[in-house]
Amino acid sequence: MASPLPAVHDTPDPDFADLLARRPHLKAHALDGLVMDDVPLVNIAREVGTPTWVYSAATLRRRHAALRDALIEAGLKATIHFAAKANDSLAVLRLLGAEGAGADVVSEGELRAARAAGIPADRIVFSGVGKSHREIALALEEGIFQINAESAEEVERISEVAVSMGATAPVSLRINPDVDARTHAKISTGLAENKFGIAYSDAAALYARMASLPGIRPIGLAVHIGSQITEGMAGYRAAYSRVAELAQALMARGLPVERLDCGGGLGIPYRDEAPPTPAALAGAIKATLGPLGLPVMLEPGRWIAGPAGVLLASVVLQKRGQNRRFVVLDAAMNDLVRPAMYEAWHGILPVAPDALHAPLSPADVVGPVCETGDTFTRGRALPDLPPGALVAFLDAGAYGATMSSTYNARPLAAEVLVDGARWAVTRPRQTHEALLANQLVPDWLGTTA
Ligand code: LLP
């Protein structure tokens, strides 16, 4: 059986200075310690407690703008639809919406969140492999920009729902291009063996069928090959070339193709990865889809939000193991599940000013949950971290809070947005009362003897 513990790397970990140099929103101040934009993280921990997710508004804006500018510079007519699954905080969605972003949603909950955050329905695309009747109806009621259908069965369902409502659904077909994105198996989506999209060989016939069905307006094609793509552009290029070829064939048959959805997936450097840049992605889109002259869409999640967030945690105690040092935090796998789920590496910085320059020794950083998998990292070079010391997990702004659970009856952590020198709690820590409040015990169980 595979080890439940995080992988040990054969290259040296980046040191604190390297980690800070690549993250302009984080600085080490001589007096305040680790600061996000103009807010010392210790102030947030003092007022809100830990564990707490903290997001940098400036970073979210800067990264959204960098992607948009790269697309514009490549001469593309493109729209950005932020993948809400990466971060569905209403404050984050509101901020990105105000920057002009739309949203990519995959559930009724995400659709409601995007709308509640003020993102207009005509900037929202609904993706996902299993949309219910109810979700399709809600999307149509709202006047959704686009539904990405992932199967012949779903196309029929969308038609039925639309007809029953007297509506017309704008539908794109998500193609499974059968290309290898060369990312972690759990987040690879573009292989034929994956559950996503429509087999390339079936797509043309299904598109033609869509054009003949009542209640459906065929809009175009969509593709998304995976997430945390760091190993070059080959996968993207192969996928987009297949989309281009198919779009051309459809148009040659007189079928309408209005726009192409290029998905998300652009990776970020958590450790020492050197992912393709937005300019490289825009260049690949231009080279493959550009000749068609159609508007394109992008569905980035991680690239925009990942680097913008940290998870602040406190040390509960340091435990001397047989020949290991365990730093036990008040954050656990229920908060940040990525290391347990994908062997993900996250930078960990101490927050106190002196701790950033103190002598280092290897430590296993773990949470209090009763599973060996609740190990964030092994053998990481860290200073002495006494009880109460604060640490920040880096690049936790995407797939952090959204993937957390209440396992071990641990309330959901608080969320905070930093904007320059001001900051606000955007989701208070869940209370223990709230954790129990939503449960019912049937009368017939009686009382405890
Ligand atoms: N579009 C579709 C259809 C998707 O399925 C996804 C992500 C995205 C866009 C956004 O991908 P991004 O730009 O964020 O890579 N929980 C995993 C990642 C799962 C990604 C799922 N789909 C993780 O923590 O690494």
Image: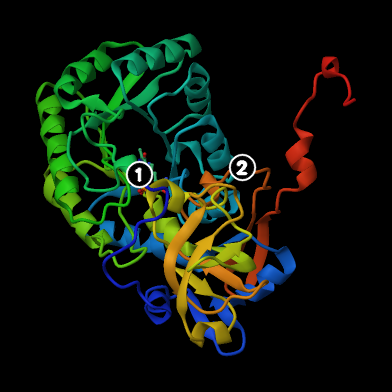
What percent of the width, then of the height, locates residue 129? 37, 27
Q: As shown in the figure, which amino acid type bears the numbered disc 1?
A: Ala
What percent of the width, then of the height, locates residue 412? 65, 48
Res 407 label = 2
Res 2 label = 1
Left of 419 or right of it: where is 13?
left
Of mark 1 and mark 2, the one earlier in the sequence is: 1
Q: From the viewer's side, name the closer residue of 107 and 79.
A: 107
Q: As shown in the figure, which amino acid type bears the numbered disc 2?
A: Tyr
Neighbourhood count class around disc 1 (C-alpha, 10 Å): few under 14, some 14–19, many 20 upward: few
- Mark 1 and ligand 1: say if the CB distance to the nearest ligand atom is below 8 Å: no
Q: From the viewer's side, name the closer residue of 427 and 336.
A: 336
Nearer to us: label 1 or label 2: 1
The residue positioned farthest toward the bottom in the image shown? 30
At x 42%, y 10%, the residue is: 160
What percent of the width, then of the height, locates residue 208? 20, 16
> Helix, strand, or loop for circle 2?
loop
